[in-house]
Image (tube, helix red, strand yellow):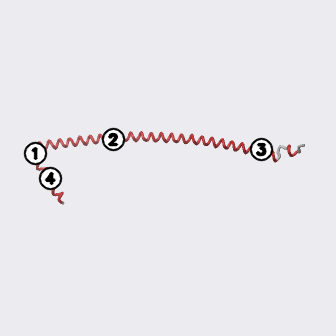
Amino acid sequence: MATTPDLAPNSPKTAAAANRASAEIRQEQLELQIAQLQADLKGIAATLAKLSSDKVNEAKDVAKGEALNLQRKGQSVLDDVQDQAEEIEQQLKDRIREKPLTAVASALGIGYILALLSRR
C-alpha cells in the first residue's frame, strides 16, 4: 500500500521530475531561439552582402562614367592643342615665305646662341 508522502503532489520526487521537465522545456526553447537567431544572422549577412555589392557596383559605374568624362575632356584638350600647333606652324611657314632672309638670319642666330650655350 502507498504511503501518504508517496501520493502527495509536492513530494521531492515529483518536484525533481517537474524541475527536469521544466529545464528540458527551457533548453528546447533556448535551442529554438538560437536557431532563430542563426537564421536571422544569416539573413542579415546576406542583406549586407547584397547592399555592399550594390554599392560597389554603383561606385564602379560612377568611376567608369567619370573616367569616360575625363577621357573626353583630355581628347578635347589634345585636339585644341593640335589645332593651335598646326595654326602656329602655318603662321611660321607663312612668315618664312614672306621674309625668307629674315628667317634664315634668325635660324643662324638661334643656332649660334645654342652652340655657345652647349660649350659651357
Image position of 68 (left or right of 79): right
Image position of 95 (left or right of 47): left
Q: Residue at x 72, y 44 (%)?
A: 24
Task: Pinpoint residue 118: horizontal percent, then vertical percent.
Answer: 18, 57
Task: Pinpoint residue 98: horizontal percent, then vertical percent.
Answer: 11, 42
Mark pair 2, 4: CA separation: 39 Å
Residue depth check, mark 3 versus mark 1: number of the one nearer the observer: 3
Q: Which residue is mark 2?
A: 71
Q: Residue at x 32, y 41 (%)?
A: 73
Frontmost residue, 1 versus 89: 1
Residue lying farthest to the bottom in this orientation: 120
Disc 1 residue type?
A: Pro
Task: Pinpoint residue 59: horizontal percent, then vertical percent.
Answer: 43, 41
Kind of element beneath mark 3:
helix
Disc 2 residue type?
A: Gln
Which one is earlier in the sequence, the residue at label 2 or at label 1? 2
Residue lying farthest to the left in this orientation: 101
Which one is earlier in the sequence, the residue at label 4 or at label 3? 3
Mark pair 3, 2: CA separation: 78 Å
Rendered image: mark on residue 111 = 4
Q: Residue at x 46, y 41 (%)?
A: 56
Disc 3 residue type?
A: Ala
Which one is earlier in the sequence, the residue at label 2 or at label 4? 2
Verify CB contact (< 8 Å) between mark 4 and mark 3. no
Quarter assignment of residue 8 = top right
Quarter assignment of residue 62 = top left
Q: Which residue is mark 3?
A: 18
Residue depth check, mark 1 versus mark 4: number of the one nearer the observer: 4
How busy is the neighbourhood of tag 2: few (under 14 within 10 Å), some, or many (20 plus)? Answer: few
